[in-house]
Image: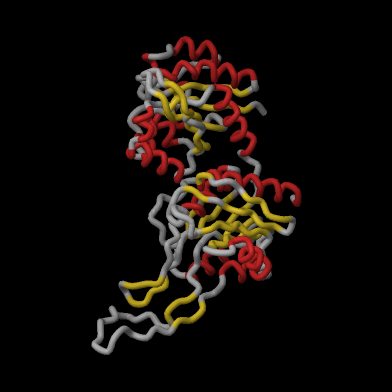
Amino acid sequence: MPKSIVLIIGGGIAAYKSLELIRRLKERGIGTRAVLTEAAAEFVTPLSVSALSGHKVYADMFSLTDESEMGHIQLSRSADLVVVAPATADLMARHAAGLANDLATTTLLATDKAVLMAPAMNVRMWRHPATQRSLKALKADGVSFVGPEDGEMACGEFGPGRMAEPETIADAIERLLSAKGSLAGFKALVTAGPTHEPLDPVRFLTNRSSGKQGYAIAAALALAGAETTLVSGPAEIAPPRVARLLRVETAREMLAACESVLPVDVAVFTAAVADWRPDIAANNKIKKAEGGPPTLKLVANPDVLSTLAHGTRRPGLVIGFAAETENVLAHAMEKRLKKGCDWIVANDVGAPGVMGGDRNTVHLITSEGTESWPEMDKADVATRLAARIAERLGKVA
């Protein structure tokens, strides 16, 4: 069945590249329905876009004719992928904030399909903290990006912000269209974040895990078509909209939530589960005493990964995470065997910016050997891992 996209054309000088993108996609057998923002119409005409795409161009959310032919909700779900090119700083900010004040942002908010953005803006705008906050929020929501590239701007400045070339964007679209559905029919479980083990009503034992890597993996698996459940400890980031979310606090709650989801085809355990908890959690706040700090008796928490890997309803593919600060590969290889995992993803959490940061350097350890991946954004780690999972499950299906 032929693939198609909804192309949202933002207002910027790079909008002219959208015409070439439509041509390139047509050559590859990919159809396009276009949404033109008010600002984009200052750079390209609806007539030129319509002539190239072979379809009516949509621009007005309140057009009675457009709504009778194809309502904006139907438009948002009429294709296999939604692409924003160029994605201006304004469009990125409005979508990150969840606004729906024109047809473009309403389409983005209403779609149940994957979204790919190709940013284009002045280098200072791209580097501005506000734009970087938008980028971070959108990636956390599962939005994919291609570019921007370094180059000379229309304004004469040089640096990152130039929209990727149409051929590059077309390649990214094809990759997403081919990946989408690669895990259709499979069920996935992902754990993420820390656990909180209460000492009393106001204090708890925990760790520095942000949950970012696990949330990104849940989003990537869901976008690839897997029916995905994310079991998350306390995390201060927005959950991926494409995955079912179960919130927990303690290790025991996490184990119970995971068991309630089984059976699944693949389980990815990224959560940093506390190894110990206080023997007794006080009902009232522990008060400071003259005799010094209280003595805490700790007891072992259930090992969520090992319990499920050795259980009678073991997931078909069990993937653990090893967060290490020394002898990363040696400790991870030992953990894979001890916990009963098929794969272990190891990383050095002692490296600056990994714990709580947006980038990661990981090693995928299997029975066949070790793959060391280059440093990349955590969203890119997730996408690459989802592709490897699809490859593995496809072989045993």
Give the image location of residue 117, x and y in percent.
47, 32
Of 227 and 149, the residue lying toward us: 149
Above or below 25: residue 98: below
Give the image location of residue 381, x and y in percent.
56, 47
Of 231 and 263, the residue lying toward us: 231
Residue 64 seen in render: no
User: What is the quadrant of residue 370 in the picture?
Assistant: bottom right
How many numbered discs sit on the rendered protein?
0
Above or below 394: residue 70: above
Of 192 and 377, the residue lying toward us: 377
From the viewer's perspective, is 295 left or right of 78?
left
Residue with the most extreme bottom position: 291
Of 27 and 295, the residue lying toward us: 295
Q: Residue at x 55, y 27 (%)?
A: 169
User: What is the quadrant of residue 324 in the picture?
Assistant: bottom right
Quarter in which the N terminus is drawn? top right
Q: Which residue is drawn at 68% across and 60% down?
A: 342
Give the image location of residue 240, x and y in percent.
47, 48
